[in-house]
Image: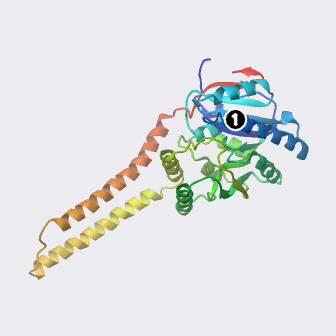
Amino acid sequence: MVAIKYNDQSQQISLMIKQMKLTIIIPIYNEEKTIPELIARLESLSKTLCKSHKLSEKEIEFIFVNDGSTDTSFNLLKDYCLEYIGRKLVNFSRNFGHQYAVSAGINCSSGDHIVIMDGDLQDPPEFIQDLYSKALEGFDVVYARRLRRRGEGWFKLITAKVFYKLLKRMSPINIPEDTGDFRIINRRVADTFKGLKESHRYIRGMISWIGFHQIGIIYERDKRFAGSSNYPLAKMIKFALDGITSFTAFPLKIASHLGMLLALLGFFYGIYVIGLKIFTDQTIVGWASLTVVVLILGGAQLITIGVIGEYIGRIYDESKNRPLYIVEGIYNKGGIS
């Protein structure tokens, strides 16, 4: 199989297929233990939607995006998608990341409405009925807002809450709290999303930035069906940085204000020292106070440089204009492309 490289996001994946009513996008990374249960619940959902919303099974498509899995996830999904109509597997050439997998799914979707959900079954497929029903009321975006997050430790819950609070205060965009990527969007939102070119992706923020008519509905997030989280602390920190730096320049303002504050304190401290020397007999003996001042100033400078460096690094990444991802192949009932 020859790797396919897409140089223009608007042309990354173009498929001439019948327009669907509903597309469900599921990014996958090392979920071999979950895939059989995931497929069973998706198939059950498809039958339920056909009855409750008078859809044909041919109007519902599942798009799995294999994000460079190293287990048997690819083989399981390939066998499934080659056998059944309306089931599609987009296979990356390597691991690019969850946000890029979701982007690939949106880029090759054809549905009037598109659902984004995780493949670990923390996002219950059955809740898609509620999202779809709400979207049919005329909403462009319906996002699932977490009432409870089962199976997640206190550290992740606390840090997530702090992050969303900070982002809400810093960003001019209203990004809903306690929401992930689990949501449904309509075709005009999907088409608008395809035109967003940034390489550092924070999709829930990007969709909030697009605007239109958005609403949230409450659900309870399940614990993982099997295995462990694919988001360790390092990935969580990177994801948080992408969210902050993509939607606000507030950290740069903080760095600037911190510099001005320290300069002002240094100025007054200098006047104080000179005043002691001229008008009193007191002298400052020793190096401890000087060392403290130097350490404070040095630390503030390094923090400021680090913040600026984060933004410059993102400018550098954008200037390379590389494709967001590379697709090894697309597998469905019609064949392999």
- Asked if residue 44 lies left or right of residue 260, the reply is right
Quarter location, residue 106: top right
Tell me if 37 is positioned left or right of 194 in this view.
right
The foreground one among 306 and 268 is 306
Q: How many marks?
A: 1
Task: From this view, report whether residue 105 is shown above or below residue 177.
Answer: above
Q: Residue furthest bottom?
A: 280
Q: Residues within 10 Å of mark 1 (few under 14, many from 20)?
A: many
Residue at the spot 54% in from the left edge and 55% down from the top edge: 156
> Where's residue 229, x and y in %?
58, 44
123 up-or-down from 28: above or below: below
Indicate the position of residue 114 as horizontal and vertical percent values. Answer: 74, 42
Q: Is residue 13 visible?
A: no
Q: Nearer the viewer, residue 195 or 179?
A: 179
Q: Which residue is mark 1?
A: 35
Q: Quadrant of the C terminus?
A: top right
| Residue 203 coordinates in the image, percent (x, y) | 61, 46
- 115 relative to 103 in the view: left or right: right
Q: Quadrant of residue 71?
A: top right
Question: Which amino acid, mark 1?
Answer: Ile
Which residue reaches farthest top? 1
In-front residue for pair 116/267: 116
Quarter of the image where the N terminus is located? top right
Question: Could one spot residue 225 in this view of the protein?
Answer: yes
Q: Is residue 178 above or below residue 67?
A: below
Q: Is residue 154 above or below residue 198?
A: below
- The residue lying at 37 percent from left, 51 percent from top is 306
Q: How is the protein colored in the picture?
A: rainbow
Image location (x, y in percent) of residue 92: 60, 29
Identify the element where label 1 is drawn.
helix
Q: Residue at x 20, y 74 (%)?
A: 271
